[in-house]
Image (spheres, rainbow, N blue to C red):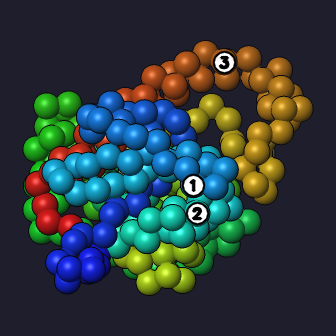
Amino acid sequence: MIKKSGMDKEEKAPIGLIAAMPGERDALLRLVGPWQQVALESLRGYSFKISEQECVLVTSGMGIRRAHDATRRLVDRISPGLLISFGIAGAVEADLEIGDVVLSNAFIELNQGVTGPVMPLAAWPDGAQGAAEKALASRRAHLFTGTAITTGGSQVSADRLGGLAHPVLEMETAGIARVALDRGIPLLSLRAISDGPRAPIPIDLGEVMDENANLIAGKLLKAILHNPRILVQSRRMLRNSRLAADNAAIALVAVMSSTNF
């Protein structure tokens, strides 16, 4: 994560942050103070500092392909020394509450129901867990370590994951990892729980999205007409997503402010 200037002075390379959705992005921008926009081809990035560490954030959109493309543009633009995938995720098991945060130490890609190999992520620095736990305590949320499961939107049962501790479902980390592995850049993943067995998503996203994570309007409307309670449940889901996005941002800032990247 170190690069040298023309004066042979060592400087930390910037950290690249990738969030899928505007709500995840905005939760972080509210905490970091002054920021400025950065052009990333057709995408818009945001540059700011956390404890004197330069960061650039990009919002990729949902799905592996969008995450991959956004990360490639980010890496080409800023040559980061570290990438962090952050935002919200779904719990597989009922041991995680809404708003809890999971630091993943590995990821698995789930493709058309087939689980790929467990791939390691970079190790979180010393003090990361303690800093995040302290920041989350006042919000009555807890911190866990686990595994990010990148899916196309479909849910998965715990018995298919081989007893992994605290697996969380999301849609981007595997796409980010393809760029990170290709360029030799360490990757971390931090996710806060927005749904799970106790508060499930009211619809199977895999059934109403195409292979590029685009919602198919006709299928979504058909699902709502079949189960009108989806609209009521969706309001709960939005509330939980805002809480999770805030907790993810709070934990990330706490970690970056208290540890040495």
Position of residue 108 measured from the top left corner of the image (x, y, whole percent): 52, 71
Q: Tell me the quarter of the picture where residue 219 sits.
A: top right
- Cα gap from disc 3 to disc 1, whole angstroms: 36 Å
Give the residue at x 76% y 45%: 214
Horizontal side of residue 203 vs 77, given as left or right: right
Horizontal side of residue 215 vs 255, given as left or right: right
Q: Residue furthest front?
A: 7
Q: Tell me the quarter of the picture where residue 6 sits.
A: bottom left
Residue at label 1? 40
Q: Which mark is residue 97?
A: none
Sequence-first tag of 2 and 3: 2
Q: Amino acid at mark 3?
A: Leu
Q: Is disc 2 in contact with disc 1, using a CB cutoff of under 8 Å?
A: yes
Q: Amino acid at mark 1?
A: Leu
Residue in front for this viewpoint, 95 or 22: 22
Residue at label 3? 231
Answer above or below: position of 233 versus 174.
above
Residue at label 2? 73
Horizontal side of residue 20 vs 10, given as left or right: right
Q: Amino acid at mark 2?
A: Arg
Q: Is residue 93 visible?
A: no
What element does badge 2 sit on? helix
Give the residue at x 51% y 25%: 238
Q: Quadrant of the C terminus?
A: bottom left
Q: Tell me the quarter of the picture where residue 121 sits.
A: bottom left
Sequence-first tag of 3 and 1: 1
What element does badge 1 sit on? strand
Answer above or below: position of 227 versus 133.
above
Sequence-first tag of 2 and 1: 1
